[in-house]
């Protein structure tokens, strides 16, 4: 089999070897130029940051890059830039990051991937991404009405046209890109329509992320308050996809993919599931018995156990005072990882598929 020449987001986020681990770095924290209804990260600012410092300082950026490269004892190290909206840091910020990566590479190959909503994409960004061989993950939920239902800006205006403009620019400049699509109640019953749409915009590697969230019955700053798991008084968010709806969404896409598109188009969930059946260790946490191989480095230099657990009790430390590799190998992170298995509800443990 020909060795693949691309790196997908699940490749980027997995520990590449026993002596490697992954990080997701958020140079802008939760700052974003959109106000997506279902975003679980926008509400982090008052509880985690406590100030208005929106950008990871240069000295923190350098320390992070240095430590992350040194900590991964493998020939190839992948940086995953996330947000919020990481392009808000500005192109010169990433030029500096590339300089620092070259400074500390030590003979290792460095790869970069970045997740964006595409709003700020322009020709300069595309030339930069192409020349530095970035893999871009574009957040786009499907056709216009599905995408614009929840992906809006601060004024409530839709973002579909700008996302599509980003697609055109990336194709024009030869930028490699994947897509990440949030599956909501709007997606139910339109499975193949979404899949064919993503194919039509040139996405050969697709990630579908089901949104199942709880909200409080009140709002803050005009936004629904997305509740932490288990919060008393919370109710299911109206944009959540139903269990049956998500199941049908994926199986209908699979039925079309397996007949027509195997080897041409790649869906993360299918890749991971088929790999497991073949006896390959899953490269994505949700398919693994335990987790904890992908830390989050926030713009203020704090390190957390997981992107979905950026809460005070899951703060592992700070890269300006702690060693990143030590935080990854800490008892706290080990406990976090095995709790995925050890704290499952009884009804999950009794499931015949467990």
Image (spheres, helix red, strand yellow):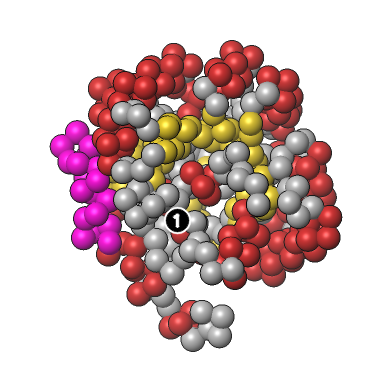
Q: Position of residue 11 (x, y in %)?
A: 51, 47
Name the residue located 21 percent from the left edge and 55 percent from the top edge: 330
Element carrying mark 1: loop
Please state the extent of the stretch shown in magenta in the rendering.
316-334
Q: Nearer the viewer, residue 350 or 310?
A: 350
Name the residue located 19 percent from the left edge and 41 percent from the top edge: 323
Q: Residue 144, relative to residue 13: is it above or below? A: above
Crowd around label 1: few <14 · some 14–19 · many ≥20 (10 Å): many
- Image-quadrant location for residue 8: top right
Name the residue located 42 percent from the left edge and 38 percent from the top edge: 76
Q: Position of residue 289 (x, y in %)?
A: 43, 69
Q: Residue 68, relative to residue 307: is it above or below? A: above
- Image-quadrant location for residue 318: top left
Q: Position of residue 16 (x, y in %)?
A: 42, 49
Q: Position of residue 264 (x, y in %)?
A: 75, 47
Horizontal side, residue 15 vs residue 198: left or right = left
Quickly name the residue at label 1: 227
Horizontal side, residue 61 vs residue 31: left or right = left
- Asked if residue 269 shows in the view, the reply is yes
The mark tally for this picture is 1
Name the residue located 24 percent from the left edge and 46 percent from the top edge: 325
Q: Nearer the viewer, residue 155 or 38?
A: 38
Any magenta on residue 332? yes
Q: Nearer the viewer, residue 285 or 339?
A: 285
Q: Nearer the viewer, residue 28 or 290?
A: 290
């Amino acid at each position: 089999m020909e060795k693949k020449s691309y790196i997908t987001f699940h490749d980027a986020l997995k520990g590449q070897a026993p002596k490697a681990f992954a990080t997701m770095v958020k140079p802008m924290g939760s700052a974003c130029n959109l106000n997506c209804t279902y975003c679980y990260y926008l509400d982090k600012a008052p509880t985690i940051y406590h100030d208005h410092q929106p950008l990871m300082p240069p000295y923190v950026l350098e320390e992070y890059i240095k430590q992350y490269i040194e900590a991964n004892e493998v020939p190839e190290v992948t940086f995953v830039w996330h947000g919020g909206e990481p392009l808000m840091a500005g192109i010169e910020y990433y030029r500096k990051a590339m300089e620092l990566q070259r400074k500390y590479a030590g003979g290792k190959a460095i790869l970069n991937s970045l997740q964006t909503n595409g709003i700020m994409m322009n020709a300069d960004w595309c030339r930069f991404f192409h020349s530095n061989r970035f893999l871009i993950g574009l957040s786009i939920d499907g056709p216009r009405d599905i995408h614009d239902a929840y992906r809006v800006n601060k004024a409530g205006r839709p973002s579909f046209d700008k996302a599509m403009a980003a697609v055109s620019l990336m194709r024009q400049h030869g930028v490699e890109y994947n897509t990440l699509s949030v599956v909501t109640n709007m997606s139910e019953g339109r499975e193949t329509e979404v899949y064919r749409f993503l194919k039509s915009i040139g996405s050969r590697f697709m990630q579908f992320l089901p949104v199942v969230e709880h909200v409080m019955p009140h709002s803050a700053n005009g936004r629904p308050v997305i509740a932490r798991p288990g919060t008393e008084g919370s109710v299911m968010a109206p944009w959540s996809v139903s269990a049956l709806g998500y199941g049908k969404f994926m199986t209908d896409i699979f039925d079309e993919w397996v007949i027509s598109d195997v080897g041409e188009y790649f869906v993360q969930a299918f890749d991971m599931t088929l790999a497991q059946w073949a006896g390959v260790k899953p490269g994505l946490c949700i398919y693994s018995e335990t987790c904890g191989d992908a830390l989050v480095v926030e713009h203020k230099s704090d390190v957390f156990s997981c992107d979905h657990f950026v809460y005070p009790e899951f703060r592992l430390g700070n890269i300006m005072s702690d060693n990143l590799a030590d935080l990854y190998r800490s008892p706290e992170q080990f406990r976090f990882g095995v709790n995925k298995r050890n704290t499952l509800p009884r009804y999950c443990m009794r499931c015949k598929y467990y």
